[in-house]
Amino acid sequence: MVHSGYRYALGASRLSKPIAAVNLGRTRADHLLEFKVEAAAGMTLAAALADR
């Protein structure tokens, strides 16, 4: 089950915080995003952590 993070994006936006997302396809928060990676989150985040 996937829970929406939209409310977190709205909260961050209200605080003028930059928002990034890793996702395949559109999200309801796309208009709020500073940066977006169009990729599968699991593989992308695992690869990013492996490079640390």
Image: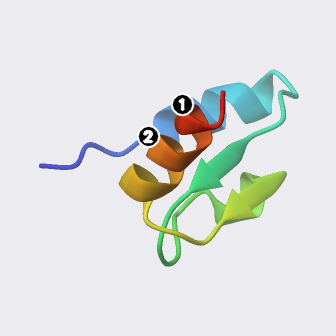
Residue 3 % position (x, y) = 26, 43
| Mark 2 neighbour class, 10 Å CA radius: few under 14, some 14 to 19, many 20 or more | few
Q: Secondary structure at mark 1?
A: helix
Residue 15 % position (x, y) = 81, 21
Tag 1 near tag 2, CB within 8 Å: yes
Question: Left or right: where does residue 29 sit relative to residue 27?
Answer: right
Residue 11 % position (x, y) = 64, 27
3, 49: nearer the viewer: 49
Q: In the picture, which quadrant includes the C terminus? A: top right
Q: Residue furthest left?
A: 1
42, 49: nearer the viewer: 49
Residue 35 % position (x, y) = 80, 55
| Residue 19 marker | none
Colour scheme employed for the rendering of this structure = rainbow
**Distance from Cα at disc 1 to Cα at disc 2:** 5 Å
Which residue in the protein does label 1 denote?
8
Which residue in the protein does label 2 denote?
5
The residue type indicated by label 1 comes to Tyr
Residue at horizontal 45 percent and vertical 43 percent from the top: 46
Residue at horizontal 83 percent and vertical 27 percent from the top: 17
In the displayed structure, 26 sits above or below 20; it is below
The residue type indicated by label 2 comes to Gly
Q: Residue furthest top?
A: 15
Question: Left or right: where does residue 48 sit relative to residue 42?
Answer: right
| Mark 1 neighbour class, 10 Å CA radius: few under 14, some 14 to 19, many 20 or more | few
Residue at horizontal 62 percent and vertical 51 percent from the top: 21
In the displayed structure, 28 sits above or below 49; it is below
Q: Residue furthest front?
A: 51
Q: Secondary structure at mark 2?
A: loop
In the displayed structure, 2 sits above or below 49; it is below
Question: Left or right: where does residue 3 sit relative to residue 33?
Answer: left
Residue at horizontal 54 percent and vertical 30 percent from the top: 8
